[in-house]
Amino acid sequence: MNANEIATKADIENLLFEIKNLQKLLSASNPERKILRSLDVRKLLHISDGTLQRLRITGSLPAQKVNGTWFYKYEDVIKMLS
């Protein structure tokens, strides 16, 4: 498709259908490798940002920082609750 071509409603519906299929494949492909961001973890555990930071510092909750964003494995969060 060139920049001068117009996308039809059918084209957009096709694209949305393909995106939904990809989302299903990605979510079903490896559910145990779910990665959470800080906000997700705070909502899941009902804790403040300071508490989450303390859990990281003490090593109670392993985390990885990538480009300024903290990421947590879902399995680690569940393991910490046990």
Image (tube, rainbow, N blue to C red):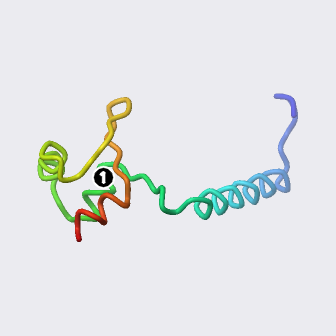
Q: What number of labels is visible?
A: 1
Left or right: residue 75 versus residue 14 is left
Q: Is residue 69 above or below residue 8?
A: above
**Rendered residue at 23%/71% (across/down):** 82
Element class at badge 1? helix
Left or right: residue 47 versus residue 3 is left
The single residue placed furthest to the bottom in the displayed view is: 82
**Circle 1 sits on which residue?**
39
Whole-percent x, y for residue 29 in the image: 62, 60
**Rendered residue at 15%/55% (across/down):** 48
Whole-percent x, y for residue 23 in the image: 63, 58
**Rendered residue at 16%/51% (across/down):** 55
Q: Residues within 10 Å of mark 1 (few under 14, many from 20)?
A: some
Q: Is residue 40 above or below residue 69?
A: below
Whole-percent x, y for residue 38 in the image: 29, 49
Q: What is the three-letter code of the residue carrying label 1? A: Leu
Q: Is residue 15 above or below residue 67?
A: below
